[in-house]
Amino acid sequence: MALPGLVILIGVLFDLATPEAYTASPLFAAAPLIAAPFFSYRGTLVTAVATVAAVLGLHIHNGTMTQVPATTEFLTVVTVSVLALFINRVVRRSGERLASARVIAEAAQRAVLPSPADRIGGLQIAARYEAAQADAFIGGDLFAVQDTPFGVRLVVGDVRGKGLDAVEAVAVVLGAFREAAEQESTLEGVAQRLERALAREGTRRSGLDAFEGFTTAVLAEIPRGDGRVRVVNRGHPPPLLLHADGALELLEPVRPALPLGMGDLASWPDRADESAYPPGATLLLYTDGLSEARDAHGVFYDPRERLGGRIFPGPEELLDALVDDVRRHTGGESTDDMALLAVSRPGERQPERRKTVPVVP
């Protein structure tokens, strides 16, 4: 950044080209202040020394060093230079603390929300967490995949709120899911365990979250070998099923349900909806950061419309294309975090044809 040096040069030229009554002291005072928030301490010090030297040299050249206005200007520039060095120190320390906080936040997010393995229970897995703002790692979106005695079970959810409180709630939901997924014989039982876990969390909290805290979630279960997927939806955007031929199916719940954590408002038994999950198909679960992403005209992103008819080699390629498409749609100005989970069932292998070797008599 050459701006401070340019300001000093303009000040010198202005002082040499104008009568003695005119002064360039505002420009000289501005140079170290411009450098302070952007330069290193050494760079700011060099700028301050260059500014003081320029003022001193000009007054010696003009023979005005013994005059009161010259002394005042010189002391002003020295004072501003010292102040600039102090500002630089404060900015650097604040930047270091912010960087440390970001590292801690990222570590907490990764500890709470680890990326699943590429293959689980014979299925291909890909997951993605896209923060709405650069360098922001703390959010309330969640996903998890677990291989259980009852098949592969998945959850994608969105906790109300942001920050450390949201991460704490994410930890509660994921902890309850991992335990329940292994122990509950039905997907409905897993949903009820999550409901009870959030109810306990709600009684522990105080203030607004104790009354309005909730989590939208969709749970899925893929039993081994029967080509079906079961889904329990608790107020969450419905999953998409992308078939191998590009056909797309929206897995909407037969009966809508309230989000998790709102059992005090209404209560009814969870019921899993079952759908065919043929070989080569990919199940896509996502949070509303995808379906509510808007373009410059306020138009929502429609994953059903944008993905229909498209064929992807695997779940990782699907998520890559989806993230790029959302960025183009929003112009890189997303306002909400986005969690994506894609699960592909490998296609059936075609039997190999045996080569016939002619018998030579």
Image: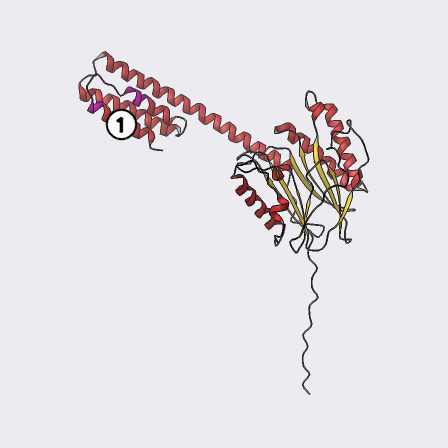
Element at badge 1? helix
Q: Position of residue 310 (x, y in %)?
A: 61, 52
Q: Position of residue 299 (x, y in %)?
A: 57, 38
Magenta span includes 24 = yes
Q: Is residue 212 above or below residue 281?
A: above
Q: Which residue is mark 1?
A: 10
Q: Quadrant of the N terminus?
A: top left
Residue 50, image quadrant: top left
The residue that appears at 65% across and 30% down in the rendered structure is: 166
Give left or right: position of 333 versus 199. left
Front residue of 63 and 3? 3
Is residue 127 visible in the rendered image? The answer is no
Q: Is residue 155 above or below residue 201?
A: below
Q: Is residue 310 above or below residue 137?
A: below
Highlighted magenta segment, given as a residue range: 15-29
**Which amino acid type corresponds to the residue marked 1 in the rendered image?**
Ile
Q: Quadrant of the C terminus?
A: bottom right
The residue that appears at 25% across and 19% down in the rendered structure is: 23
Disc 1 crowd, CA 10 A, few/some/many (<14, 14-19, 20+) = some
